[in-house]
């Protein structure tokens, strides 16, 4: 760690308020626990939002929810580790801006603002669309199988850029930040990070991503294994910063910075699938208290996502067989956050309804 890195002061949530929140939930006209995961979700949102109040909140709200899709390219994608060529990262960013992707449909359907961040796509995205945020670190990372993905300064810059973007959204009124990503090759990066920080066998960390064949899977595993062996030989005591520098992506590092800044500001962080969850795990490794602010949207089909969720002690809201990325699972989970707020705020209590049990 150097003084180049942004410093985050994240408050641990005040769990002494948990009983008051739970009493409010249990006073509703329903058997205790009968709304299942929605009750835990309402409790989490209330606990997060209680940070800004003197006591447990009587009302919880979803204000200006925003989806931040971070996009960048990866040096490892010079190898055929994906079903798509590297050019697809740029093409998909343009598709986001043209409202043609799944994430556009789901954000529109669920009243979520969308911003797309160029964190380091090979070719700078040219558009005057206000939804495009340029935070380029470089034209893609290095090939982590043979060299560091980024320099220490680039990592510091990426963390700071993500933090600025999150702060801007909070300043604009958002109290829910949802995260998505786009980057050909980024499941390879996430898998390498997982193998490094969780000491997981590469065969368990590496999956088929968006649907590669067995030959591509073998190559992907081999490249990640090379990276893991190289990094472990260089860092007998590996820290989260080292792992991100050696095997991360610019979009992953910027999501880490954005999550840490969002937690610092006391907003809810809505976490998508494997790659976003891996960014969340790296954020927790840097600042464990940020875990308090995270809600996990879904469990993806990528085999290693379960391992990441276990490492985070996370119970995802949905399991829909998704493996697209883009933040699609997070967008689909947003109605559940709204439903949790609705029953917490508006459902009658036994006393107000005159119901005796």
Image (cartoon, rainbow, N blue to C red):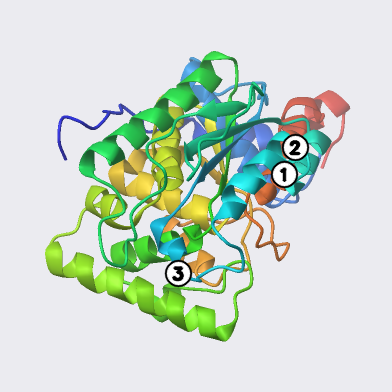
Q: Name the residue under label 2.
A: 107
Task: Please tell me which residue is depicted at 44% across the width and 64% down the height of the picture.
Answer: 78
Answer whether labels 3 and 1 touch (C-beta < 8 Å).
Answer: no
Mark 2 to mark 1: distance in Å?
Answer: 6 Å
Mark 3 to mark 1: distance in Å?
Answer: 27 Å
**Which quarter of the figure has residue 264?**
top left
In the displayed structure, 331 sits above or below 315; it is above
How many marks can you see? Answer: 3
Is the residue marked by circle 1 packed among few (<14), some (14-19), or many (20+) residues within 10 Å?
A: many
Mark 2 to mark 3: distance in Å?
Answer: 33 Å
Image quarter (top left, top right, bottom left or bottom right) of the C terminus: top right
Is the residue marked by circle 2 packed among few (<14), some (14-19), or many (20+) residues within 10 Å?
A: many
Q: Name the residue under label 1.
A: 103
Q: Which of marks 2 and 3 is in front?
A: 3
Question: From this viewpoint, is residue 266 visible?
Answer: no
Residue 101 screen position, x and y as percent: 75, 46
Task: State which tag comes first along the sequence, 3 or 1.
Answer: 3
Residue 184 screen position, x and y as percent: 54, 57
Secondary element type, mark 1: helix
Q: Mark 3 points at which residue?
A: 79
Circle number at residue 278:
none
Image quarter (top left, top right, bottom left or bottom right) of the N terminus: top left
């Amino acid at each position: 760690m150097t003084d180049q890195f942004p410093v985050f002061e994240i408050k641990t949530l005040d769990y002494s308020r948990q009983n008051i929140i739970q009493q409010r939930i249990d006073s509703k006209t329903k058997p205790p626990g009968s709304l299942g995961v929605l009750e835990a979700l309402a409790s989490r949102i209330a606990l997060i939002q209680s940070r800004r109040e003197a006591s447990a909140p009587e009302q919880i709200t979803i204000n200006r929810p925003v989806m931040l899709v971070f996009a960048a390219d990866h040096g490892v994608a010079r190898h055929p580790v994906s079903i798509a060529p590297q050019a697809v990262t740029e093409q998909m960013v343009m598709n986001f801006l043209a409202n043609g992707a799944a994430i556009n449909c789901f954000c529109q359907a669920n009243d979520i603002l969308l911003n797309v961040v160029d964190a380091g796509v090979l070719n700078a995205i040219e558009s005057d669309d206000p939804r495009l945020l340029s935070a380029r670190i470089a034209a893609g990372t290095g090939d982590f199988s043979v060299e560091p993905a980024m320099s220490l300064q680039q990592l510091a810059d990426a963390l700071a850029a993500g933090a600025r973007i999150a702060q801007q959204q909070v300043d604009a009124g958002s109290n829910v930040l949802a995260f998505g990503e786009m980057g050909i090759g980024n499941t390879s990066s996430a898998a390498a990070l997982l193998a490094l920080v969780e000491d997981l066998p590469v065969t368990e960390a590496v999956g088929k991503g968006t649907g590669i064949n067995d030959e591509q899977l073998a190559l992907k595993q081999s490249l990640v294994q090379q990276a893991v062996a190289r990094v472990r030989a260089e860092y007998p005591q590996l820290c989260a910063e080292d792992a991100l520098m050696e095997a991360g992506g610019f979009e992953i590092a910027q999501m880490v910075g954005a999550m840490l800044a969002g937690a610092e500001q006391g907003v809810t962080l809505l976490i998508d699938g494997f790659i976003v969850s891996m960014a969340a795990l790296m954020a927790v490794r840097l600042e464990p208290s940020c875990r308090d602010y995270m809600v996990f949207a879904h469990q993806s089909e990528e085999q290693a996502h379960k391992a990441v969720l276990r490492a985070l002690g996370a119970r995802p809201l949905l399991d829909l067989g998704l493996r697209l990325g883009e933040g699609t699972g997070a967008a689909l989970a947003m109605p559940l956050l709204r439903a949790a707020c609705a029953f917490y705020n508006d459902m009658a209590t036994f006393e107000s309804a005159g119901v005796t049990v």
